[in-house]
Image (spheres, helix red, strand yellow):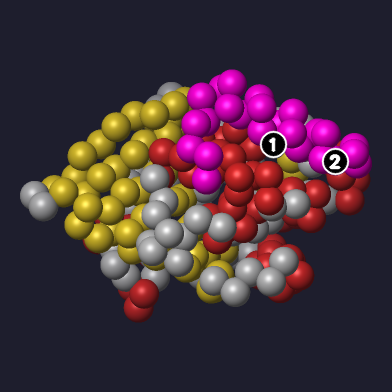
């Protein structure tokens, strides 16, 4: 067995032990080659359960966090999902295994181009990308059944709440002073929004506007 296969099995077993029970999510982790999303210098850590640095000072989330967020998002195969913060594209590729279409937004052109190349190489035909400010969402494609944000917001972005379908779920890290963040799950009901706190987390900040010159 190749070393990466063994590392992958160990990672998936660790995720299961850590409480990720949805077999579709675990299968997606097993299917997507994380080494393709990791910078060359960190290839040997592709299946370690840790966050890794990517270009533009951003971070590829730890596999546990990717699995946990995907699990709590309860993605169905007919769903339309909005992702804010494409980064490496790893979380996007996981979502693409589980739903009908992923619309993913990134504010750095460099990261978006690299992610697009990976999506092509993996032949992911159900991913649509855009360079843009994800805090504003993607009104032309709204409403979304699910929204996942992989950068920490100062407060819940109103535009994203508006673009969530009734019955829809959003998972988003939000800053809680002083200097902490928590992962929230928001469910849109007929008469408003329900809010659950899931986990203390650490994400790079959600920043307004498109990054200049990168
Ligand atoms: N899901 C990514 C995590 C990347 S880190 C992965 O698996 O690799 C979060 C990303 O959110 C960064 O790439 C950052 O540039 C991006 N981001 C931050 N604010 C944003 C905004 N307003 N709109 C779009 N992307 C944003």
**Residue at image point 72% right, 66% down:** 122
Q: Depth-wise, is mark 2 or mark 1 nearer the camera?
A: 2
Label 1: few (<14), some or many (≥20) within 10 Å? some
Give the mark, 2 or 1, whose residue is nearer the N terminus: 2
153 to the left or right of 111: left
Percent across and percent down for residue 158 are: 28, 55
Out of 118 and 123, give the one closest to the viewer. Answer: 123
**Magenta stretch holds residue 22:** yes
Q: Which residue is mark 1?
A: 51
**Front-most of 210 and 15?**
15
Pointer 2: what residue?
Answer: 4
Q: Which residues are magenta?
A: 1-24
Q: Quadrant of the N terminus?
A: top right
Specify the quadrant that holds the C terminus: bottom right
Q: Secondary structure at mark 2?
A: helix
Residue at 87% across / 44% down in the picture? Answer: 43
Residue 51: percent from left, percent from top: 69, 36
Q: Position of residue 137 (x, y in %)?
A: 39, 65
3D distance between C-alphas at marks 2 and 1 = 18 Å
Name the spot of residue 165 as percent of width and height, x first: 25, 60
- 48 in relation to 172, above or below: above
Looking at mark 1, is its residue's CB closer than 8 Å to ligand 1?
Answer: no
Quadrant location of residue 195?
top left
Q: Find numbered disc 1 in the image and state the secondary structure of the residue it sits on.
A: loop
């Amino acid at each position: 067995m190749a070393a990466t296969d063994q590392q992958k099995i160990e990672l998936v077993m660790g995720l299961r032990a850590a409480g990720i029970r949805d077999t579709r999510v675990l299968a997606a982790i097993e299917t997507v080659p994380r080494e393709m999303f990791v910078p060359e210098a960190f290839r040997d850590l592709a299946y370690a359960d840790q966050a890794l640095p990517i270009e533009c000072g951003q971070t590829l989330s730890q596999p546990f966090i990717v699995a946990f967020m995907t699990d709590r998002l309860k993605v169905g195969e007919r769903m339309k999902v909005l992702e804010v913060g494409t980064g490496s594209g790893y979380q996007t590729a996981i979502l693409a295994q589980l739903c009908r279409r992923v619309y993913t937004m990134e504010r750095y052109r460099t990261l978006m181009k690299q992610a697009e190349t990976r999506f092509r190489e993996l032949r992911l035909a159900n991913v649509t990308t855009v360079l843009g400010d994800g805090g504003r969402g993607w009104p032309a494609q709204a409403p979304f059944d699910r929204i996942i944000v992989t950068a920490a917001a100062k407060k819940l972005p109103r535009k994203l709440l508006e673009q969530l379908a009734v019955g829809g779920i959003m998972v988003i890290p939000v800053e809680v002073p002083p200097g902490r963040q928590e992962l929230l799950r928001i469910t849109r009901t007929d008469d408003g929004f329900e809010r659950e706190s899931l986990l203390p987390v650490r994400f790079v900040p959600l920043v307004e506007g498109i990054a200049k010159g990168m």
